[in-house]
Amino acid sequence: MKNIVALSPVFTEDSINLKHASIGSDYNLNRFNLKWDVPEEFRNDVIAVYGEDIYAEIVSSQCDLALLKTEDNWLSNISEKFTKRNIQYGQLEQFINHQNVFIKCSDFKNFKAGVYERVSDIKGFDSVDKESMAFISDVVEWLLEVRCFVLNGKIETYSTYWRDNQFDTNGLSDSEEIELFSFFESFVKDNLDSLPTSIVLDFGIIKDNGWALIEANPAWCSGLYACNAKKALDVIIKSCIKN
């Protein structure tokens, strides 16, 4: 087998759609086994990986892959012109006295992201590593959220996933699509140098503030929602570099 994309052994709708999208292509999407382990004889042929972030990290070390993603503190360095909210990055203990903030762990999800009245309200706070890195930001109301698979500064495919406080992949109106692409072009013009060539960017509309950047996610572990699976697969493969 050549040009293998290692899939997590966990079956998801996204991984099944990617497998179907690969039919007739030059890529072989393979789960191998129920363990997070690529057999030795196939490791040289694995050119990409898709699955849970921890799974991807393990496979990348086995198969000598570099996984593209933004710098850990990237989001906190983006201008408020595009985030439309104050975002800070640091160790959790630095934010102990902050109140009514959105908090998200920056690595492997040591705690559930969300809005907290007090940082100490995080479930299991006493056992959480206070030196773990996290983002905090102003609390805002998102009216709409959109996922974009981006390659070389261009949106290859996109999908809505949240609208009016509920899951929604029904798409954008014509005017919303024009607004999204206009905002994206402005954002990329100022920030392309800080982006990997292959990345997933989420954008949305904040109540009373308009379009804003939500966050960046690695393509190799991002959900597809209603994105075109074939186009997303191309972005995912290019988010993994064979060393």
Image (cartoon, rainbow, N blue to C red):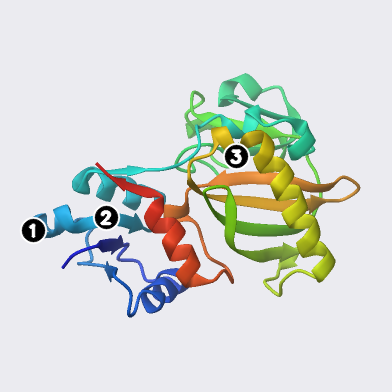
Position of residue 24 measured from the top left corner of the image (x, y, whole percent): 32, 80
Position of residue 16 measured from the top left corner of the image (x, y, whole percent): 40, 75
Q: Nearer the viewer, residue 7 or 105?
A: 7
Query: Residue 41 — which label?
Result: 1
Q: Residue at x 48, y 45 (%)?
A: 197
Counting residues from the start of the chain, the first of labels 3 and 1 encountered is: 1
Looking at the rendered image, the disc whose residue lies closer to the viewer, 3 or 1, is: 1
Counting residues from the start of the chain, the first of labels 2 and 3 encountered is: 2
Farthest residue, direction top = 94
* Residue annotated with mark 2: 47
The amino acid type, in three-letter code, at marker 3 is Lys
Q: Is residue 181 above or below residue 190?
A: below
State the CA–CA distance, disc 1 to disc 2: 14 Å
Callout 3–callout 1 Cβ contact below 8 Å: no
Looking at the rendered structure, the secondary structure element under dot 2 is: strand
Position of residue 139 measured from the top left corner of the image (x, y, whole percent): 78, 40
> Which quadrant of the structure image shows residue 175?
bottom right
Q: Is residue 175 above or below residue 192?
A: below
Counting residues from the start of the chain, the first of labels 1 and 2 encountered is: 1
The amino acid type, in three-letter code, at marker 1 is Glu
Q: Is residue 110 above or below residue 181?
A: above
Q: Residues within 10 Å of mark 3 (few under 14, many from 20)?
A: many
The amino acid type, in three-letter code, at marker 2 is Ile
Looking at the rendered image, the disc whose residue lies closer to the viewer, 2 or 3, is: 2
State the CA–CA distance, disc 2 to disc 3: 31 Å
Position of residue 107 measured from the top left corner of the image (x, y, whole percent): 47, 38
Query: Residue 104 — which label?
Result: 3
Is 63 placed left or right of 110 in the picture? left
Q: Residue at x 60, y 39 (%)?
A: 104
Q: Considering the image in quadrants, where does the C terminus appear?
A: top left
